[in-house]
């Protein structure tokens, strides 16, 4: 009888997991408080509360990234939240709630940040929205050792290289992908995501992700690697940590891009009425020379 009950409850738990039970991904990657305290705690506390409330409002609407600021009084507060785009709305809000209570642990510090697997929260007394890569960037290697180490390592390397190249070119500044290759003992799959803050430019996103890549390239054969920085986030794993439906094809974003300008110099004889542009019937050309300028954007 006892055994039966355990079996039934296990089945229920398993079903919940299968149905995509909530997972706010609050595994802590990094946190920190500024060394400087605010001048007026009550004013600061009001500002912080107001910005956190505003951020929460944006997440309620289903956004994955938001900034909010209250610049009144002696202690302005600029705040930013970001959830990984594969997080559901509820998981994102739940991750944010955990981050906001944790960030209050910095009490009177005029700046603080908390970075989880699933989300990121930061506030400062100055505008920091444009920061890309900053001092303090770091890589975090961990987990167990992946099976088929060498195949896994090369797969991770290729996957991360593609993510770093493609993500700055994707409008949402977010990409999730998986790469599967055949190994001696069966297939090996590496999963990865890359993400940039939506307030930086493509160039900043690219620079930040390059630093992130350098920080976790050394991680394999560890099964997991994460890189955190002011402007971006990069992660790989040997197990899927995002829904399969978030995987995108990176290939279209890996092509060399070119912008082609064509400068046409139209020549026509000033007195040759036949060959010259005729304003009433449209344009006709006597002869033309075209120059092509191709700018390779990388
Ligand atoms: C900042 O405030 C906290 C709590 O009020 C206090 O413990 C800490 O010593 C202060 N730090 C500085 C640098 O004044
Ligand atoms: C800000 O929010 C915290 C936590 O909810 C609360 O303890 C504090 O009193 C609030 N501060 C102000 C000034 O409203
Ligand atoms: C705040 O810090 C204390 C002491 O370091 C810790 O015990 C507590 O869990 C922290 N609270 C949060 C919400 O992180
Ligand atoms: C193994 O990976 C290849 C692609 O590299 C794929 O075509 C094949 O279906 C995979 N096999 C299994 C058993 O998943
Ligand atoms: C992925 O699937 C989940 C449900 O399983 C759904 O809520 C979500 O909107 C889907 N996302 C995309 C990008 O298709």
Image (cartoon, rainbow, N blue to C red):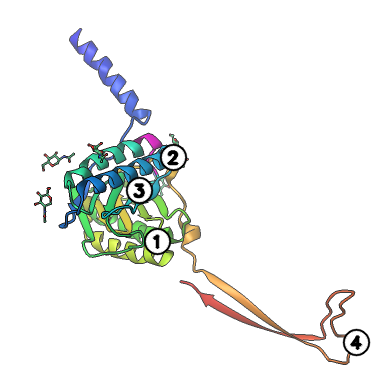
Q: Please rate how many residues cluster around mark 1, counting C-alpha atoms within 10 Å: few if below 14, some from 14 to 19, many from 20.
A: some
Dot 3 beta carbon under 8 Å from ligand 5: no
Residue 105, position as x, y percentages in the image = 17, 44
| Residue named by callout 3 | 82
Lower position in the chain sequence, tag 2 or tag 1: 2
Question: Could you tell whether 251 is left or right of 270 in the image?
Answer: left
Determine whether 53 is above or below 263 in the image: above
Residue 261 placement: quadrant: bottom right
Q: Please rate how many residues cluster around mark 4, counting C-alpha atoms within 10 Å: few if below 14, some from 14 to 19, many from 20.
A: few
Lower position in the chain sequence, tag 3 or tag 1: 3
Specify the label residue 62 is tagged with: 2
Q: Are marks 4 and 3 in contact (CB under 8 Å)?
A: no
Mark 4 vs mark 3, foreground winner is 3
Q: Please rate how many residues cluster around mark 2, counting C-alpha atoms within 10 Å: few if below 14, some from 14 to 19, many from 20.
A: some
For mark 4, give the secondary structure.
Answer: loop
Determine whether 187 is above or below 16 in the image: below
Lower position in the chain sequence, tag 4 or tag 3: 3
- Cα distance in 3D space between marks 4 and 3: 65 Å
Residue 16 placement: quadrant: top left
For mark 2, give the secondary structure.
Answer: loop
Front in this rendered view, residue 153 or 27:
27
Residue at x 66% of width, y 81% of height = 263
Residue 121, position as x, y percentages in the image = 29, 48
- Cα distance in 3D space between marks 2 and 1: 21 Å
Specify the label residue 273 is tagged with: 4
**Magenta span of residues:** 86-91
Front in this rendered view, residue 159 or 296:
296
Lower position in the chain sequence, tag 3 or tag 2: 2
| Residue named by callout 1 | 200
């Amino acid at each position: 009888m006892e055994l039966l009950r355990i079996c039934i409850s296990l089945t229920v738990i398993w079903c919940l997991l299968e149905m995509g039970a909530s997972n706010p991904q609050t595994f802590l990657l990094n946190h920190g408080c500024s060394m400087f305290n605010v001048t007026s705690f009550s004013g600061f506390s009001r500002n912080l509360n107001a910005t956190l409330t505003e951020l929460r409002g944006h997440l309620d609407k289903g956004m994955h990234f938001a900034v909010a600021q209250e610049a009144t009084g002696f202690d302005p507060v600029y705040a930013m939240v970001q959830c990984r785009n594969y997080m559901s709305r509820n998981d994102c809000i739940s991750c944010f709630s955990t981050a906001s209570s944790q960030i209050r642990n910095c009490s009177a510090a005029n700046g603080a940040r908390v970075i989880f697997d699933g989300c990121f929260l930061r506030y400062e007394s100055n505008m920091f929205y444009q920061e890309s890569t900053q001092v303090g960037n770091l890589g975090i290697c961990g987990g167990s050792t992946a099976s088929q180490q060498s195949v896994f390592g090369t797969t991770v390397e290729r996957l991360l290289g593609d993510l770093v190249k493609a993500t700055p070119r994707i409008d949402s500044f977010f990409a999730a992908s998986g790469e599967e290759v055949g190994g001696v003992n069966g297939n090996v799959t590496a999963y990865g995501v890359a993400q940039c803050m939506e307030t930086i430019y493509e160039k900043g996103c690219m620079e930040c992700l390059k630093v992130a890549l350098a920080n976790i390239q050394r991680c394999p054969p560890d099964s997991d690697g994460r890189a955190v920085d002011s402007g971006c986030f990069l992660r790989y794993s040997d197990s899927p940590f995002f829904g399969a439906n978030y995987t995108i094809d990176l290939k279209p974003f890996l092509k060399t891009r070119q912008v082609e300008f064509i400068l046409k110099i139209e020549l026509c004889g000033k007195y040759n009425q036949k060959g010259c542009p005729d304003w009433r019937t449209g344009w006709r050309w006597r002869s033309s020379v075209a120059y092509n300028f191709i700018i390779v954007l990388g």
